Image (cartoon, rainbow, N blue to C red):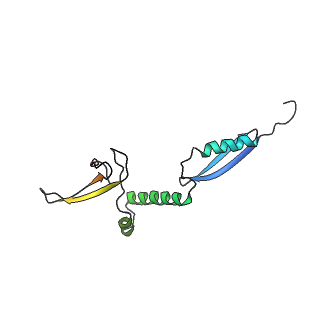
Amino acid sequence: MNGEPKTRYHAEVQVTLEGRPARINVFADTLAEIFKDIGTICSQFPQDWMNPAKREIINAERKADQLRQNGQLPGHVEKKLGPKTPVCVNCGSTNTELIKWIDKETGQPKQAWKCQDCKQWLPKSRKA
């Protein structure tokens, strides 16, 4: 060091990631290192983290899911949202449809999810 003080740089970036505030602190010897480190960190975020409209949709869906689980979702909103679409366990598609019918033997109404891509029925253990 030869008696000279060494200059270190510090950067603090605040972002909202998936509805939660996040703070990124970076320390380096040069500004170029600071920007490189920030770029490396941000490249690991989900692709649509910067899109405000997408974040709002995700936040609204999460809030609706919380209210649905607690039984607090108003009926008129529940009708508009419909049932939560499950993911197909066979092909991973979200293009699933809730099929309803009347059982011929019992006369009882029945329903089950069917994948519209691979045409497979989803297991009964998956709830809407």
78 relative to 6, above or below: below
| Apparent side of residue 74 relative to residue 41 in the rendered image (left or right) | left
Q: Residue at x 64, y 52 (%)?
A: 14
Question: Could you say where residue 78 lies in the image, as x and y percent from the top left?
Answer: 37, 65
Question: Could you say where residue 34 lies in the image, as x and y percent from the top left?
Answer: 71, 43
77 relative to 37, above or below: below
Please name whichever residue, 19 or 49, is drawn nearer the observer in this view of the structure: 49
Which quadrant would residue 73 be assigned to in this image? bottom left
Viewport quadrant of the N terminus: top right
Q: Residue furthest bottom?
A: 76
Q: Residue at x 16, y 57 (%)?
A: 103
Question: Could you say where residue 85 lies in the image, as x and y percent from the top left?
Answer: 36, 55
81 relative to 50, above or below: below
Which quadrant would residue 69 be assigned to in this image? bottom left
88 relative to 64, above or below: above
Q: Residue furthest front?
A: 117
Viewport quadrant of the C terminus: bottom left
Q: Residue at x 46, y 56 (%)?
A: 62
Q: Residue furthest top?
A: 2
Q: Residue at x 51, y 58 (%)?
A: 54
Question: Could you say where residue 87 lies in the image, as x and y percent from the top left?
Answer: 36, 49
| Apparent side of residue 105 relative to residue 29 in the rendered image (left or right) | left
